[in-house]
Image (cartoon, rainbow, N blue to C red):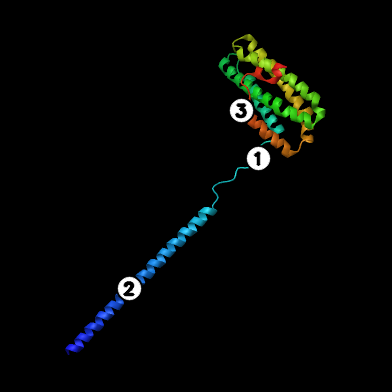
Amino acid sequence: MTQTAAGGTTRQRKSTTAAKKATKAVKATKTTASAASKSATKTATATATAKKPTGKKSMPATATGQDAIAMLKDDHKVVEKLFKQFEKAGDSAYAKKRQIVDEVIKELTTHAYIEETLFYPTARKAAPETGEHVLESVEEHHVVAWMLSELMSTDPRDERFDAKMMVLMENVRHHVEEEEKEWFPEVRKAMSRSDLKELGAKMEAAKSKAPADPLALSSAKS
């Protein structure tokens, strides 16, 4: 009886030990599988992150920018809008008219600068038949630059202020009409779209270099 009981006890211990080992093996397998799963998840996440674009690539200015002629026409529209605002302002709206004129001075000085330094030389080279038009435009810039300078120093309450602004508007509107109708089309025919866009990008970049004083324009000195 004693030997049988001892034998049974021994078998129970062996069985318990085997069960514990089996349990440990299962746990080890689960741990390994879990670790492998986490590793795979991290790898997949890293791969997806690497493939995910960080943002749209910026296109070069020559591919996305405005062409030179379109840019100049837009400038003309901005100035014309300011002219109409001035015309609608009341006779005694001195502060408002001063603000409008200051904006006109800035817009026209910048516009004239990019035309004289970049657009006119390029246009004349690409379309030699526009040479006379370019020369006339520069002379018109000369007159406008001096008028702008006078408006800078004239008090809006001065009776000559409105008169000077009216003459300026007449000159600029005539200048714009000649450019847009008579010789801008010739330049567009002579230059490719890519060349015009490249020129437009250069003109846009040059705006920040424009002088604040209209008399600093090359046309004002000629």
Mark 1 and mark 3 in contact? Answer it, CB < 8 Å. no
Q: Residues within 10 Å of mark 3 (few under 14, many from 20)?
A: few
Residue 167 in percent (x, y) is at 70, 15
Residue 23: mark in rendering: 2
Q: Amino acid at mark 1?
A: Thr
Which is in the foreground here, disc 2 or disc 1? 2
Mark 2 and mark 1 in contact? Answer it, CB < 8 Å. no
Callout 2: SS: helix
Q: Amino acid at mark 3?
A: Ser
Looking at the image, tell me whether mark 3 or mark 2 is earlier in sequence order: 2
Give the residue displayed 20% in from the left and 85% down from the top.
6
Q: Is residue 193 above or below residue 24?
A: above
Residue 191: mark in rendering: none
Of the 4 image quadrants, the one containing the N terminus is: bottom left
Cα distance in 3D space between marks 2 and 1: 67 Å
Cα distance in 3D space between marks 1 and 3: 19 Å
Callout 3: SS: helix
Residue 152 in percent (x, y) is at 61, 15
Which residue occupies the foreground of this view, 204 or 185? 204
Q: Relative to residue 154, is residue 222 drawn left or right?
A: right
Q: Relative to residue 18, is residue 113 drawn left or right?
A: right
Which residue extends farthest right? 129
Cα distance in 3D space between marks 3 and 2: 77 Å
Q: Is residue 161 above or below residue 192?
A: above
Q: Amino acid at mark 2?
A: Thr
Looking at the image, tell me whether mark 1 or mark 3 is earlier in sequence order: 1
Give the residue displayed 32% in from the left and 75% down from the top.
21
Per the image, the residue denoted by label 3 is 208
**Residue 219 picture quarter:** top right
Looking at the image, tell me whether mark 2 or mark 1 is earlier in sequence order: 2
Of the 4 image quadrants, the one containing the C terminus is: top right
